[in-house]
Image (cartoon, helix red, strand yellow):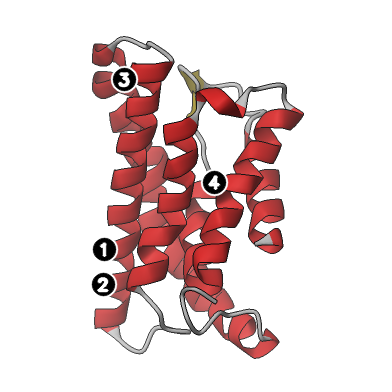
Amino acid sequence: MVISALIFGATIYISRFVPIKLGTVQVLYPAAILAPLFGVWFGVWGSAGLVIGNILSMVVVGMNPAIFPLALLAQFIMGFVPGIAFRKVRFEGTRDRIVFIATVTLGMMVSTVLVALNLALIQKIPGNVVWGTIWPWMQVSNTLSAAIFSPILFAWMSDYMNKSGLFFKRFLG
């Protein structure tokens, strides 16, 4: 949990300095690429670390995490869905890659809906802005980028994670 919280939180914090935002949503969100990996590698604890890392990054920049409950749940879902659905230490064939990409995509789609609901219901951003501009953009900044780059990082890093003993063989640890 500590590893995912620190790396995820630092990635969010650093990417906050990208000046282009749609509402409170960052146009560039590299943390979305790491989130599924932490869920797969560290199980439920890696997914929980995503929430803690996001809270830490919010506090550091003066944001109140209490007004982002659905967005924080979304951070957990980004790791939870791929983490519970894909419990292998490496890709063993094309089917594994397809399943991994599908679970990453599903997790990102669900999480972006939660972020959009947080923006519309709690932050009172008009629905046409949320669903017509912000949510579609999150499909590029979160879903598409994670579907492309998460499998590459997984293939590259998973043997190291497994050999180092950091990979959780069971989702609940």
Q: Is residue 58 left or right of residue 83?
A: right
Q: How dense is the environment of label 3, judged by Cα within 10 Å: few (below 14), some, or many (20 and up)?
A: many
Does the CB distance between marks 2 and 3 fall below 8 Å?
A: no
Question: Residue 120, image x and y in percent?
Answer: 33, 18
Q: Which residue is mark 4?
A: 30
Does the CB distance between marks 3 and 4 fall below 8 Å?
A: no
Q: How dense is the environment of label 4, judged by Cα within 10 Å: few (below 14), some, or many (20 and up)?
A: some
Does the CB distance between marks 1 and 2 fall below 8 Å?
A: yes
Does the CB distance between marks 4 and 1 fall below 8 Å?
A: no
Mark 3 residue type: Val
State which mark lies toward you, 4 or 1: 1
Against 71, is 95 above or below?
below
Q: Nearer the viewer, residue 142 or 60?
A: 60
SS type, badge 1: helix
Does the CB distance between marks 4 and 2 fall below 8 Å?
A: no
Mark 1 residue type: Ala
Q: CA distance from mark 3 to mark 4?
A: 21 Å
Q: CA distance from mark 4 to mark 2?
A: 21 Å
Mark 4 residue type: Pro
Residue 14 visible at all = no
| Residue 160 sits in quarter | bottom right
Query: Mark 4 vs mark 1: which is more N-terminal?
Result: 4
Q: Which residue is mark 1?
A: 102
Q: Which residue is mark 2?
A: 98
State which mark lies toward you, 3 or 4: 3
Q: Is residue 114 left or right of residue 95?
A: right
Mark 2 residue type: Ile
Question: Residue 155, image x and y in percent?
Answer: 48, 77
